[in-house]
């Protein structure tokens, strides 16, 4: 065994009310693709922030290339050869690729030289990217390439990647994996965080599993099943969602040639979407990021008003109703962006519960808030959806991404909507929590609600959907029964073959 590139020894970090990391020790070898696994709140984020200089451990030590490694900040970590691609991109839409990369440099060279470096690295690692493109016009996969190339220009010895495939198409995932395998072959180590366990099995050499801040095991992902890894993460048997056999009821939501202009320069216009959704069904809508998902959710939730006669709820024209008015009659929505859109970061969980549940849960009376009732509702969401937090008084930003996701989805489901629209319901949550959220959506439909699930996770959509449709450039394909759809048919739908169902029937 060669000398490890990075050695972690007894790292411990505690916050008020929680020990995020407890005596964490493991090695990463040069050129190794090393997975870091764990359910939400297991301590993965704290650990990688420690390696990247964002968090100072309470005790323990790190060695990088056999030398003591105590980065005071990310700049020091980068200087030592550690780079990180975060789950949430830090890019400016109005600037081009080269300009965004320049902003991440300590002493950037002239813009022409940066553009030349981008083209060189792009070609070298198979990451197609034009340095002159405006970032707001890029796909999610192309945006990620900007972040990766920014890191590669630093010539890192260790590249940390946090949920890198959560917004990528299968084709973009294949490109990313080829790049990571090339980096590994050249000796760059990769610390890879993902909840997609089959990806871990395909890509990674070793996996370290955290549970409640402690290392509970290591394994060879290629020789370990995804289910076994998931059960090691959660410490119990993994629940598989059960899809009840239920007939669809009456039509509850109708879209009649729904069209709307893009809300901003980098948005997507909705084009002639016609759809009926019935009580008791789960309608799955797939699509590559940036094809109108956010705009469709906004049109359904009331954040974006549309022309009369385009949106009908139980035979009522609601196209001009505001979000709270729609909530009061039973149409609820949970957007993709949980921090800042679905939840206010600095407000407590009780306050965040009030923001969307005030009307349906009757949390006000004569202009006064019922704080006790609101706190009890928030506590119910926390308990029923296993949200890991000391309590409802904690701020939303104090939760891990997956735990905040559980709170946001649980908050809407526990209001017993007649129609629930959710965008990326299991984004960034672990296998156990994802299964629980999917089961909760199926249970809601079984009680008679119409559920619209918009997701980029095709396995998720096939698991829970009764019918499936695809968004492409703001157009929606005609829904088809999810049972029996082939990968090829789904691929055609995602690619914009909106009349494919006709060809399928005739052919």
Image (cartoon, helix red, strand yellow):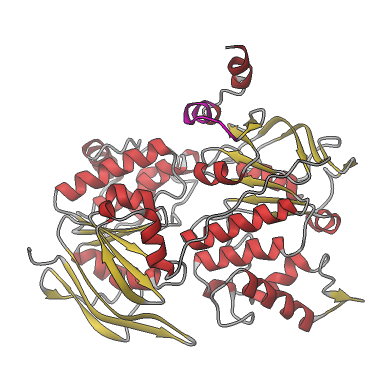
Q: Can residue 45 be found in the magenta stretch?
A: no
Quarter of the image with the C terminus is top right
Identity of the residue furthest to the right in this view? 366
Residue at (76, 39) in percent of width and height: 277
Left or right of 98 in this view: 314: right
- The answer to whether one can see residue 334 in this image is no
Q: Where does residue 496 sit, x and y in percent of width and height? A: 56, 26
Location of residue 417 by image quarter: bottom right
Label the magenta part by its dominant secondary structure: helix
Task: Establish if 499 lies above or below 283.
Answer: above
Location of residue 473 by image quarter: top right
Quarter of the image with the N terminus is bottom left
Q: Where does residue 369 sit, x and y in percent of width and height? A: 82, 78
* Residue stretch in magenta: 483-492
Left or right of 136 in this view: 454: right
Of residues 484 and 66, which is closer to you in this image? Answer: 484
- The answer to whether one can see residue 244 in this image is yes
Q: Where does residue 334 sit, x and y in percent of width and height? A: 66, 56
């Amino acid at each position: 065994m060669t000398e490890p590139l990075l050695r972690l020894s007894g790292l411990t970090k505690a916050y008020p009310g929680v020990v995020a990391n407890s005596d964490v020790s493991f090695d990463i070898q040069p050129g190794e693709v090393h997975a870091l696994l764990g359910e939400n709140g297991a301590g993965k984020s704290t650990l990688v922030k420690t390696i990247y200089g964002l968090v100072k451990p309470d005790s323990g030590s790190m060695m990088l290339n056999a030398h003591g490694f105590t980065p005071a900040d990310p700049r020091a970590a980068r200087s030592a050869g550690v780079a990180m691609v975060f789950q949430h991109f830090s890019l400016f839409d109005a600037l081009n690729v080269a300009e965004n990369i320049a902003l991440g440099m300590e002493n950037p060279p002239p813009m022409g030289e940066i553009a030349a470096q981008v083209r060189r690295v792009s070609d070298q690692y198979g990451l197609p990217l034009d340095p002159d493109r405006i970032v707001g016009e890029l796909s999610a996969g192309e945006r990620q390439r900007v972040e990766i190339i920014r890191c590669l220009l630093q010539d890192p010895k260790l590249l940390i990647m946090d949920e890198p495939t959560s917004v990528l198409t299968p084709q973009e995932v294949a490109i990313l994996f080829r790049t990571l395998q090339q980096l590994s072959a050249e000796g760059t180590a990769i610390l890879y965080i993902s909840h997609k366990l089959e990806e871990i099995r395909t890509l990674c050499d070793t996996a370290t599993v955290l549970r409640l801040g402690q290392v509970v095991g290591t394994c060879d992902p290629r020789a370990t099943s995804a289910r076994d890894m998931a059960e090691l993460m959660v410490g119990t048997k993994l629940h598989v969602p059960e899809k009840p056999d239920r007939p669809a009821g009456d039509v509850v939501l109708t879209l009649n040639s729904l069209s709307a202009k893009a809300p901003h320069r980098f948005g997507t216009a909705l084009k002639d979407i016609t759809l009926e959704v019935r009580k008791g069904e789960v309608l799955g809508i797939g699509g590559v990021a940036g094809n109108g998902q956010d705009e469709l959710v906004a049109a359904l939730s009331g954040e974006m008003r549309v022309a009369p006669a385009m949106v009908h709820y139980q035979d009522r024209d609601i196209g001009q109703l505001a979000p709270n008015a729609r909530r009061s009659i039973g149409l609820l929505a949970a957007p993709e962006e949980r921090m800042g859109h679905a939840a206010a970061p600095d407000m407590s969980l009780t306050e965040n519960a009030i923001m969307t549940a005030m009307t349906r849960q009757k949390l006000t009376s004569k202009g006064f808030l019922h704080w006790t009732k609101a706190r009890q509702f928030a506590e119910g969401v926390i308990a029923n959806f296993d949200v890991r937090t000391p309590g409802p008084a904690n701020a939303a930003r104090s939760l891990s991404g997956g735990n905040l996701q559980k709170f946001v989805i649980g908050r809407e489901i526990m209001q017993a909507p007649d129609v629930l629209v959710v965008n990326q319901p299991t984004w960034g949550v672990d296998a156990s929590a994802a299964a629980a959220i999917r089961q909760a959506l199926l249970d809601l439909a079984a009680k008679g609600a119409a559920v619209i699930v918009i997701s980029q996770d095709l396995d998720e959509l096939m698991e829970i959907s009764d019918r499936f449709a695809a968004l492409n450039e703001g157009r929606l394909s005609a829904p088809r029964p999810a049972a029996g759809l082939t990968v090829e048919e789904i691929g055609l739908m995602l690619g914009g073959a909106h009349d494919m169902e006709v060809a399928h029937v005739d052919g």
